[in-house]
Image (tube, rainbow, N blue to C red):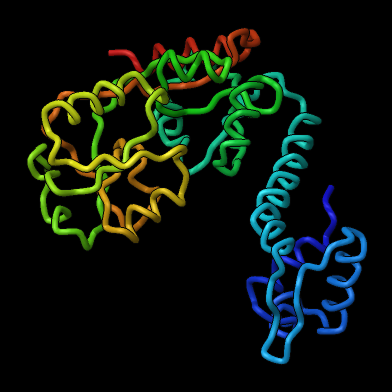
């Protein structure tokens, strides 16, 4: 699917030398050097500058390094999805799962769901949470993945060309580092956020988040709002490393072990449920109906 020399390149960059990369790959240093030379030859670019002090990435090497992790993971995920597509899909619901789209809500509901559709089984399909994967998976639900659990609103559904089954309205919370002074609290007030950097998804991602944003801008200018483009683990790392406050929901409590998710005394919520194809198969439709009944009062 992809040139395996790319993986060697990745190890060399991360290790900082051919010898250390060889140790991690359990091959000889000359074999590593040969693979890098072949990669540079096939790409017709110089990736490293060899000096007596070690290896230095060229600009081409820096550019390739930024993309290669995604290339490798994307190819691995593609193989997984292809293998899943070969399996008989009748009676199996393929549930996409990532740190931002945990399947725990379905695991919790499963005993009740089975009462309404006892012949249906589910299969968890992990995927890396990247903007590219979000576009591909949500725009093609029903092909390799049937449902994904997550927060959404009509704006996002229209943008991603999918449909949503709302299961709950989740309170909008805040995540902070366990070392942050606010982590000592069990619940935050809006005033607790004064002087803090509050990380919010960019305008237009969710109508519900935009309502919160407008309220804070108008009535609480003491809070410094920091926009970001996409929820992934890197954003949670940034929150922890820079001692910021991150808008979150309780369902993400296991994304980062060093973050604590706290409720806030505002009345803002966001829909949470299952994203699925606008034209689900009969099996998926049966499953969605069962989930809706199981989640009901």
Residue 185 in percent (x, y) is at 10, 50
Residue 140 location (% of width, % of height): 66, 21
Between residue 118 and residue 69, name the one nearer to us. Answer: 69
Where is 158 relative to 199, above or below? above
The residue lying at 73 percent from left, 35 percent from top is: 81
Q: Residue at x 86, y 66 (%)?
A: 40
Q: Position of residue 240 (x, y in %)?
A: 32, 57
Q: Quadrant of residue 155?
A: top left
**Toward which corner of the image does residue 94 lie, by quadrant?**
top right
For this view, does 205 lie left or right of residue 62?
Answer: left
Residue 222 position, x and y percent, is: 13, 41
Quadrant of residue 215 in the image? top left
At 81% from the left and 79% from the top, the residue drawn is 27
Q: Is residue 182 above or below residue 272?
A: below
Tally the marks.
Answer: 0
Judged left or right of residue 155, residue 63 is: right
Residue that lies at the very extreme toward the front in this rendered image: 59
**Residue 84 versus residue 32 in the image, above or below:** above
Q: Nearer the viewer, residue 217 or 286?
A: 217
In the image: residue 103, left or right of residue 263: right
The residue at the point 53 percent across, 18 percent down is 159
């Amino acid at each position: 699917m992809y040139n395996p020399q790319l993986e060697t390149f990745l190890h060399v960059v991360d290790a900082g030398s051919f010898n250390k990369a060889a140790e991690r790959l359990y091959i000889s240093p000359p074999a590593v050097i040969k693979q890098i030379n072949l990669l540079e030859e096939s790409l017709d670019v110089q990736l490293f500058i060899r000096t007596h002090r070690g290896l230095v990435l060229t600009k081409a090497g820096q550019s390739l390094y930024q993309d290669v992790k995604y290339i490798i993971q994307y190819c691995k995920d593609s193989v997984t999805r292809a293998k899943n597509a070969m399996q008989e899909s009748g009676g199996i619901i393929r549930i996409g799962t990532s740190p931002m789209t945990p399947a725990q809500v379905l695991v919790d509901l499963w005993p009740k769901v089975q009462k309404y559709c006892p012949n249906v089984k589910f299969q968890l399909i992990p995927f890396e949470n990247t903007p590219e994967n979000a576009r591909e998976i949500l725009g093609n639900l029903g092909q390799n993945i049937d449902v994904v659990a997550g927060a959404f609103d009509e704006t996002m559904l229209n943008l991603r060309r999918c449909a949503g089954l709302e299961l709950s309205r989740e309170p909008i919370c805040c995540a902070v580092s366990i070392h942050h002074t606010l982590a000592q609290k069990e619940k935050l007030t809006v005033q607790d956020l004064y002087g803090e950097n509050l990380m919010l998804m960019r305008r237009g991602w969710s109508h519900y988040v935009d309502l919160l944003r407008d309220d804070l801008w108008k009535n609480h200018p003491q809070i410094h709002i920091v926009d970001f483009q996409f929820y992934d683990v890197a954003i949670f790392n940034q929150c922890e490393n820079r001692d910021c406050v991150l808008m979150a929901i309780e369902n993400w409590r296991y994304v980062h072990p060093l973050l604590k998710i706290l409720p806030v005394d505002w009345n803002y919520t966001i829909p949470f449920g299952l994203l699925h194809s606008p034209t689900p198969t009969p099996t998926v439709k049966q499953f969605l109906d069962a989930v809706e009944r199981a989640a009901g009062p």
